[in-house]
Amino acid sequence: MSVTLAHGAGGEKTLELLTKLILSKVPETLKRTPEGSGIDVLDDGACVKIGDKYLIVTMDSYTVNPIFFPGGDLGKLAASGTINDLVAMGARPIAMLDSLIVEEGTEIEIIDKITSSFIDIVVRENIPLIGGDLKVMPRGQLDKIVITVTGLGIAKRPIIDRDLRPGDKIVITGNIAEHGATIMALQQGLDAERYGLHSDCRPLLRPLLDIVEKYVNHIHAMRDPTRGGLAQTLNEWARDTGTLILIYEDRIPIRFEVRKFCEMVGVDPLYLACEGVMTIAVDSETAPVLVEELQSAGMENATIIGEVRESEKFRGTVVCRTVSGGLRIVEPLRGSLVPRIC
């Protein structure tokens, strides 16, 4: 057995590999800290209880190709993605550390642009950059540059994705598939801007976290749908909580240009990565109020796209009611639609 691109796509193959290499080898008692969470949940980060608060820790490596794209670059993506992972756990970022691995021969100007984009986001969001590392690999042993970022945050009440329950509504804060469609077009040699495509890469700390903290006792799961897109996020929630998630195709916000591109290349936009929206599971009474506040805060496309149900027959399943009124099962991602997307 050899590693394939599908093993890094964030879908079922990724889980299979993680289970074989790591999860099956770590005792259950060591998969998390007392009163915290870790690889027992496989959330956007881990939480460690310290006094009456929680330290949230997240770490990710970013290796998007190409490293410059409409709407951002590798540096902006690395900073924004780390911040969004903390926000998804209900945490306020308090510090970040970054590690750069660079290929010998890469132009200093390219690295400077990437690091400047990264630092611009960190400075704008007022997050201390407290450490890191730099390595250089021999020419041909790495494709330009990889950034690994560790983010630290504090949460009074962390949002853990195991708390999803029947009756919850599924809310999305904006248009889906923007980043995935853009990177896919570029990797296929197409002019993304000509097709009206651009990444939604951006940090969601403000104003989203203020609203989330206001309703944190009513929010039961939250995640930014990156690798594997909305489909993979919902499948993991359904699988981990034994619920049925029903979504409505006509309620899912997607720009005309993105939908047209996906139809042209024959790709389901549900599986394409987002880098500037959040998926939220919230109780039914709070959902309309939450959406209204999100829209008032500038997320005008925020909307309720589905709901969580109890079903013995379809436990762990995501179902989509199509525009025509039919039903289709939304399978978890099993291959690799877009390699090196984030």
Image: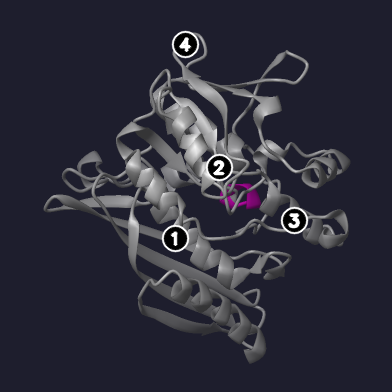
Q: Residues under labels 1 and 2: Cα distance? A: 21 Å
Q: Which mark is residue 182?
A: 3
Q: Say whether residue 2 is visible.
A: no
Q: Residues under labels 2 and 3: Cα distance? A: 25 Å
In the image, residue 115 lies at what x, y percent?
Answer: 54, 80
The residue at the point 53 percent across, 38 percent down is 233
Q: Which residues are magenta?
A: 3-8
Residue type for callout 2: Gln
Circle 4 residue: 311
Please tell me how many numbered marks the rendered image carries: 4
| Helix, strand or loop for disc 2 | helix
Quick one: label 1, few (<14), some, or many (20+) residues within 10 Å? many
Q: Mark 1 or 2, which is nearer the eye?
A: 2
Residue type for callout 3: Thr
Q: Which mark is residue 317?
A: none
Residue type for callout 1: Ile
Q: Mark 4 or 2, which is nearer the eye?
A: 2
The residue at the point 50 percent across, 67 percent down is 79
The residue at the point 38 percent across, 58 percent down is 58
Taking the view exactly as shown, the residue that stands out farthest to the left is 51
Q: Residues under labels 3 and 4: Cα distance? A: 37 Å
Residue type for callout 4: Ser
In the image, residue 218 lies at what x, y percent?
Answer: 34, 32
Q: Say whether residue 38 is visible.
A: yes
Q: Earlier in the sequence, mark 1 or mark 2?
A: 1
In the image, residue 322 lies at what x, y percent?
Answer: 72, 20
Q: Is 249 situated left or right of 312 in this image?
A: right
Q: Earlier in the sequence, mark 3 or mark 4?
A: 3
